Image (cartoon, helix red, strand yellow):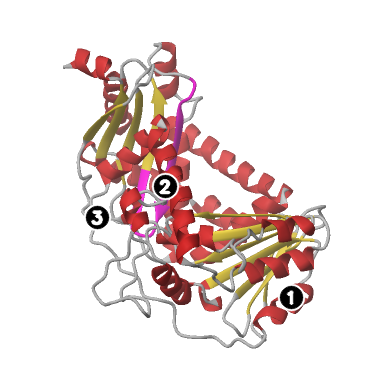
């Protein structure tokens, strides 16, 4: 363990340490004198991942059902006797939870005391899988209900249909939980095979923030993984062939909503693969999204003053392995009029150019959000883990943001915001849709 590195920022007055444990686990420790200590453990296995070859024990040619990563997340909390490990964490005064995204599964714990024991319990949680036919049947019922709840949420449905409209092959178009049909096909054998393939130390990253030091954390890690050596290489993943253009420019869904909902998407072409390039593109997208769609901007204010949009308006961007898009959503009586305003606004911006003042304002907002994130151990742990799993240094944010140029953002806008890349998802009651025909 002589590969320890220390990264620091004189500007922020902060530092963290990182090394790779002999087991292959990447460990990052950020000492911070705050009341709560936070640990996050990320597994490089998410809902969009498809193994290039079947995990051991699964017949060749058998497809990986949707929702396996999420199902595994649920099952990791089950003890050998069938009870939940939540009680074990509660006895330590610790809070534990997890989530599954498209590119990773993350388990996290926080406590104000007895943190070594809480971290030990977290490592134990991801080190073994307890599954039986009966427990998998019980979990199927729970996840099926979760799927139905998401399906019955108009806002969730509108957004999900937008992604499906934009993406033809990439698994980002599918629900993280899977479908009722796919969940029925998930078996204990399948879960065990994927656990064995992906839940290995060399496929994980641990970030810890709080009143801790690197030696203290390594003692806990050694107690669990001291006998482990770096095992087989990380599983290879399939990279789906995704066309540049959206699958369809428009999709509508009938649901009993009092006011129509809309989601407008812009599909990004040419997603980079180099970690630094991805990081820079992500920051470009965040700046550009703020420039174009801010609540203080012309687009939102014109719609709001005309009564075409409700205050529930939201906007943002997403970038991941093989996908990237801008999205804005809201509710209003005339979603197609909102879309037409969007298209005209983009055309006007292309004609007049982006505002340099908006560029500087958006960069300052990004900078401010980043600096204030160091006020909470949870935010630091989340950012530290995400940056490490993305292959970049946490403190590279400020120099990268400072190096962004107006010309770079303008060129990206010109390449991305063209009508062929747009998609619209609308949810409205049957009565409203009939009046539009």
**Residue at coordinates 35% horizontally, 45% vertically from top-left?**
325
Which element carries disc 3, helix, strand or loop?
loop
- Span highlighted in magenta in the image: 311-325
Which element carries disc 1, helix, strand or loop?
helix
The prevailing secondary structure element of the residues shown in magenta is strand
Give the position of the C terminus as an image quadrant: top left
Tell me whether the residue at label 3 lies in contact with that at label 2, contact meaning CB atoms closer than 8 angstroms: no
Q: Position of residue 352 (x, y in %)?
A: 32, 29
Which one is earlier in the sequence, the residue at label 3 or at label 1?
3
> Is 32 on the left-hand or right-hand side of 382?
right
Mark toward the viewer: 3 or 2:
2
Residue 355 can be seen in this image: no
Circle 1 packing at 10 Å, graded few (<14), some (14-19), many (20+), is some
Most foreground residue, 256 or 167: 256
- Which residue was labeled with disc 1? 220
Residue 169's label in the rendered image is 3
**Residue at coordinates 54% horizontally, 69% vertically from top-left?**
130
Q: CA distance from mark 3 to mark 1?
A: 42 Å
Circle 2 packing at 10 Å, graded few (<14), some (14-19), many (20+), is some
Q: Position of residue 273 (x, y in %)?
A: 37, 64
Give the position of the N terminus as an image quadrant: bottom right
Q: Position of residue 320 (x, y in %)?
A: 40, 56
Residue 144's label in the rendered image is 2
Q: CA distance from mark 2 to mark 1?
A: 37 Å
Q: Is residue 436 magenta?
A: no
Point out the residue furthest to the front here: 134
């Amino acid at each position: 363990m002589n590969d320890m590195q220390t990264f620091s920022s004189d500007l922020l007055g902060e530092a963290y340490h990182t090394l790779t444990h002999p087991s292959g686990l990447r460990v990052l420790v950020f000492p911070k004198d705050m009341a709560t200590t936070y640990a996050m453990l990320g597994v490089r296995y998410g809902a969009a991942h498809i193994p290039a070859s079947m995990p051991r024990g699964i017949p060749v040619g058998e497809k990986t059902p949707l929702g396996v990563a999420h199902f595994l997340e649920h099952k990791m909390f089950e003890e050998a006797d069938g009870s939940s490990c939540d009680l074990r964490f509660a006895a330590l005064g610790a809070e534990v939870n997890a989530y599954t995204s498209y590119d990773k599964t993350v388990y996290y714990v926080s406590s104000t005391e007895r943190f070594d024991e809480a971290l030990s319990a977290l490592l134990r949680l991801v080190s073994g899988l307890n599954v039986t036919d009966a427990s998998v049947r019980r979990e199927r019922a729970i996840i099926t209900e979760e799927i139905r709840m998401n399906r019955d949420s108009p806002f969730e449905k509108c957004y999900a249909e937008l992604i499906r409209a934009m993406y033809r092959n990439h698994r980002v178009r599918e629900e993280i939980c899977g479908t009722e049909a796919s969940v029925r096909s998930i078996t204990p054998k399948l879960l065990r095979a994927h656990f064995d393939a992906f839940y290995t130390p060399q496929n994980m990253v641990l970030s810890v923030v709080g009143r801790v030091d690197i030696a203290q954390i390594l003692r806990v890690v050694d107690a669990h993984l001291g006998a482990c050596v770096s095992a087989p290489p990380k599983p290879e993943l399939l990279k789906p062939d995704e066309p540049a253009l959206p699958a369809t420019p428009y999709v509508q869904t009938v649901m009993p909503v009092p006011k129509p909902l809309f989601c407008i998407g812009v599909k990004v072409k040419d997603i980079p693969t180099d970690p630094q390039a991805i990081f820079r593109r992500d920051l470009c997208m965040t700046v550009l999204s703020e420039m174009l769609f801010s609540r203080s901007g012309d687009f939102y204010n014109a719609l709001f003053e005309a009564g075409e949009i409700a205050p529930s308006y939201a906007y943002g961007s997403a970038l991941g392995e093989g996908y990237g898009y801008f999205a804005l959503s809201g509710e209003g009586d005339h979603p197609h009029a909102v879309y037409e305003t969007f298209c005209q606004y983009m055309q006007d911006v292309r004609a007049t150019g982006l505002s340099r003042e908006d560029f500087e304002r958006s960069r300052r907002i990004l900078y401010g959000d980043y600096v204030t994130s160091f006020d909470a151990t949870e935010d630091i742990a989340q950012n530290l883990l995400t940056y490490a799993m993305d292959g970049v240094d946490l403190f590279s944010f400020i120099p990268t943001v400072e190096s962004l140029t107006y010309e770079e953002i303008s060129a990206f806008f010109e390449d991305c915001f063209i009508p062929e890349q747009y998609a619209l998802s609308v949810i409205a009651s049957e009565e409203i849709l009939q009046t539009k025909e």
